[in-house]
Amino acid sequence: MKHRWATLVALTLVVSFLAAPAASLASTTEAIADTGGTTLTLDILGSPLEIAVSLDEIGHITEVLISDTAFAVDRGDDHRVRFSNTDESTRIEVRAKKHKLRTDVKTDTVAGILGTHQWAGKLFGSDQDTLVTFDVVENASGHPELENVSVDALFPADATATVGAVENEVGADEAESKVEIDFAWNGFEMRLKIKAELHLDGDDRPAHLRVELKGKDRQRLALDNLGELVGDHSWTGRRCDGTPIAVSYTIDDPAGVSFDGVSGVDSDAFEVKSKGHGFEVRFDDSEARVRVELKQKSDGDWELRVRSKTTEKCDHHDDEDESEHEKKDDDD
């Protein structure tokens, strides 16, 4: 089903940021960038509001589409875009930074976040959306609570999803309800965190809904039979300018893991170092690196770990006006 989007992020603003050198802008992990973005559909007061976020291959926000003409952009760059509605009673903010992609909705009444909502995103390189549905209801105390959290579609087909228990907590200045959903596939993990909260300290927009996807480019496979890992392997990612790169390696029995080569860059654009149980490749355009290790654990199982820090290491800039609370959230 196609939608006519009534409001979209100011393209001249986004284009002006994308025109800058890519190497100075990239700071999102491959795991988040590879989703291509996410969609959050909010059934607020029976009137659906859709927020669709598009990312490029290194995690820049290239477009944010909102289905309500009452919202307009009041600030934005390639990592953060914020909308407010006409009477400024509701603010929507999208952020793509490091290993997180999140959407925040802040409004002046609890009713502004109540309803049955749906999140959609492509995980682990799938071309089909994983779908998560959840309800935000108002309890007897007038606080928002999460209910009926479910994974309605999961891709890739052999991925797993674990829905945690909803946690409700009331403090001196806020009441919150939160849940986490853990996704896993082929040794990779991602997490979706949903939180509804009400600030009790007189905030202009006290009701707050946050939906955040977290994921790092880390693979961890544990098998009792080394033979299941034997063969040719490769890791794929990007340099800071967006150039695709690949690191190839081989696992032998009993020799272990060995480095084969790097494609996508010249031989003088990287260096390889032996790292005990494997190797590490470092690229010369940033602090970007990939480490591959194969170990036999004390219980006899074999564990393959592939950990990378690539586009997220291209810069470390933060918004100057970011609150300490937001910075703490980013470090979680």
Image (cartoon, rainbow, N blue to C red):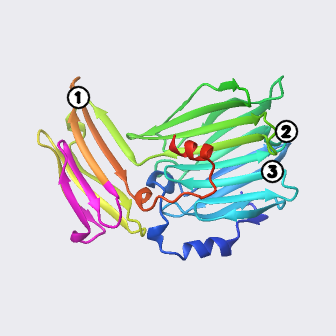
Indicate which disc, 3 or 1, sits on the residue closer to the N terminus.
3
Residue drawn at 70 percent across, 63 percent down: 75
Residue drawn at 26 percent across, 47 percent down: 292
Q: Nearer the viewer, residue 91 or 295?
A: 91
Closer to the eye: label 3 or 2: 3
Q: Position of residue 31 (x, y in %)?
A: 46, 51
Residue 198, located in which quarter of the rendered image? top right
Disc ID at residue 297: 1
Does residue 263 belong to the magenta stretch?
Answer: yes
Residue at which label 3 appears: 90
The local secondary structure at tag 1 comes to: loop
Q: Quadrant of the N terminus?
A: bottom right
Indicate which disc, 3 or 2, sits on the residue closer to the N terminus.
3
- Magenta range is 262-289
Contact (Cβ within 8 Å) of mark 3 with mark 2: no
Give the answer, above or below, for where 28 lies relative to 141: below
Q: Nearer the viewer, residue 305 or 77?
A: 77
Residue 318, located in which quarter of the rendered image? bottom right
Residue at which label 2 appears: 111
Residue type at mark 1 is Lys
Specify whether 186 is left or right of 24.
left
Indicate which disc, 2 or 1, sits on the residue closer to the N terminus.
2
Specify whether 249 is left or right of 135.
left
Residue type at mark 3 is Thr
Give the answer, above or below, for where 256 lies relative to 177: below
How many C-alpha atoms fall within 10 Å of the one at disc 3: few (<14), some, or many (≥20)? many
Marks 2 and 1, how far apart at CA: 52 Å
Closer to the eye: label 3 or 1: 3
Residue drawn at 59 percent across, 38 percent down: 193
Farthest-out residue, right: 87
The local secondary structure at tag 3 comes to: strand
